[in-house]
Amino acid sequence: MAAHIRVPTVVSRAGAVSALTVAAVGGPVAGPGIPQQAEAASAAAKALQIAASKKGAPYVYGAAGPNRFDCSGLSQYAYKRAGKRLPRTAAAQYNRTRHIKTTSRRGGDLVFFHSGRSVYHVGLYAGRGRIWHAPKPGTVVRLERIWTKKVWYGQVR
């Protein structure tokens, strides 16, 4: 069932784009009187927009923006700009998030790639089984399908 979002008639261009992005990735639109959970969803939607805006930025190991990123640097940068703090590494970010099931994931949630119990990569969930991420040396920030089932999901609190 499609969600109906009522957007005020006088909205800035950025506000309209934000509301449309939130609707596209399946998150709620925050407003007065909406619980703190909506605030977290709003931060996730903003972080997703910020990560997407870095499309084409080169991967550089250890880089955390604003023009170069590694995987955890991109997620840390995007969430920092959205008003949330994250630690620097993918594993530390996993430990800081609220772990959720695949069926509960929403746009902007973090996707952690693991081997056994070790997290080695992170990206931001973009919907439809895709993530924004900084893959590896020689690549750039890009939108890509999740290529494995060995992933865990986390929501930034």
Image (tube, rainbow, N blue to C red):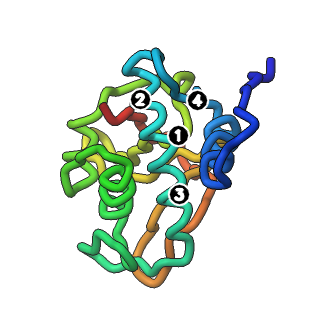
Task: Report crowding for label 2: few under 14, some 14 to 19, many 20 or more residues within 10 A (C-alpha).
Answer: some
Q: Which mark is residue 132?
A: 3
Q: Which mark is residue 39?
A: 2
Comes first in the chain, label 3 or label 2: 2
Mark 3 or 1, which is nearer the eye? 3
Comes first in the chain, label 3 or label 4: 4
Q: Amino acid at mark 4?
A: Val
Q: Amino acid at mark 2?
A: Glu
What's the CA distance linking mark 1 and mark 2?
Answer: 29 Å
What's the CA distance linking mark 3 and mark 4?
Answer: 21 Å
Expressed as whole percent of the image width and height from the top left, the position of residue 85 reads 23, 46
Q: Residue at x 52, y 28 (%)?
A: 30
Q: Residue at x 37, y 62 (%)?
A: 74
Query: Element type at marker 4?
Result: loop
Comes first in the chain, label 4 or label 2: 4
Q: Residue at x 22, y 56 (%)?
A: 89
Q: Is residue 78 above or below residue 135?
A: above
Q: Is residue 82 left or right of residue 97?
A: right
What's the CA distance linking mark 3 and mark 2?
Answer: 21 Å
Are discs 4 and 2 less than 8 Å apart at CB? no
Q: Is residue 44 left or right of residue 146?
A: left
Expressed as whole percent of the image width and height from the top left, the position of residue 157 reads 30, 31
Are discs 3 and 4 less than 8 Å apart at CB? no
Which residue is the site of mark 4? 29
Q: Amino acid at mark 3?
A: Trp
Are discs 1 and 2 less than 8 Å apart at CB? no
Expressed as whole percent of the image width and height from the top left, the position of residue 130 reads 61, 49
What's the CA distance linking mark 3 and mark 1?
Answer: 17 Å
Q: Amino acid at mark 1?
A: Lys
Expressed as whole percent of the image width and height from the top left, the position of residue 2 reads 79, 23
Query: Element type at marker 3?
Result: strand
